[in-house]
Image (cartoon, grey):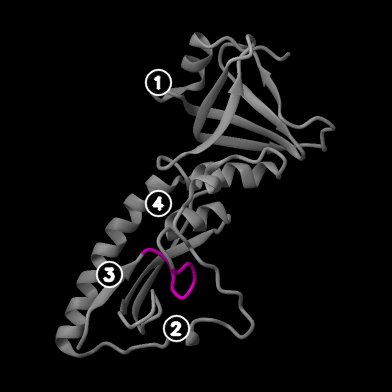
Amino acid sequence: MGTFNLHASLLPQYRGAAPINWVLIKGEKETGVTTFFLDKNIDTGKIIFREKTSIGNDETAGELHDRLMIIGGDLVMKTINSIEKKSHKLIDQTDWAGEGDLLKNAPKIKKEDCRINWNIPAEKIVNLIRGLSPYPGAFTELVSPTGERYSLKIYRATFTKEISHSIAKKVSTDGRSFMSIIVQDGMVHIERLQISSRKRMNIAEFLNGFGIDNN
């Protein structure tokens, strides 16, 4: 009968190598898993089953992966049982795409995809961080008060929207327990991060060992 596969998105959306990352980066509120028969093209075969799930507002790629792993395991067993009983019905992927719907792809994550652009809206920055946490990690560059440059990966952050600021990328911190980056439409609040060659830490631990002020 062929070979079937489990894909971590609601096909035909987010075909490709990194669907879990891209649904978060793109700010989707819903995703799921799909079983489908393989054909000659990538992730285009006929669908057997799909299972939907909502995405949590603060959910990271690692957390979503673990949930989809459980949902996917159940769907694989459902698929096997259905094939064994010959009770499954195959659905062409074009039937799941509405007329004029734009299909979104999920290509392999490259290093340039991971660099944080602080000139985009706060929500998009946080979605990038969520979508790349814990691996490969969204990164930026931090310049110390003495002029040293460090690669900094951010694994968890939240945001608040405020009136547009005239200055982007300005650091706001009390030097002890919080650090936020002012961006075009609000603030990105850093919660968990890792500086190059050091362990991952929460923001209080980071500020305790790395002096930063508002200047």
Secondary structure state at the residue bearing disc 3? helix
Q: State whether residue 123 appears in this view.
A: yes
Looking at the image, is mark 2 or mark 1 earlier in the sequence?
2
**Amino acid beneath label 3:** Leu
Label number found at residue 75:
3
Q: How far separated are the C-alphas under marks 3 and 2?
A: 18 Å
Secondary structure state at the residue bearing disc 1? loop
Which residue position holds label 4? Answer: 64
Q: Where is residue 151 in the image (x, y as percent from the top left)?
A: 52, 27
Query: Which secondary structure type mostly characterizes the magenta part of the structure?
Result: loop
Image quadrant assignment for residue 141: top right
Looking at the image, is mark 1 or mark 4 earlier in the sequence?
4
Of badges 2 and 4, the one in the foreground is 2
Range of magenta residues: 8-15
Few, some or many C-alpha atoms within 10 Å of disc 3 (few <14, some 14-19, many ≥20)? many
109 in relation to 145, above or below: below
45 in relation to 86, above or below: above
Q: In this view, does 148 lie to the left or right of 49?
A: right
Q: Position of residue 36 (x, y in %)?
A: 32, 78
Looking at the image, is mark 4 or mark 3 earlier in the sequence?
4
Looking at the image, is mark 2 or mark 4 earlier in the sequence?
4
Q: How far separated are the C-alphas under marks 2 and 1?
A: 46 Å
Q: How far separated are the C-alphas under marks 3 and 1?
A: 40 Å
From the image, which quarter does the C terminus lie in? top right
Which residue position holds label 1? Answer: 198
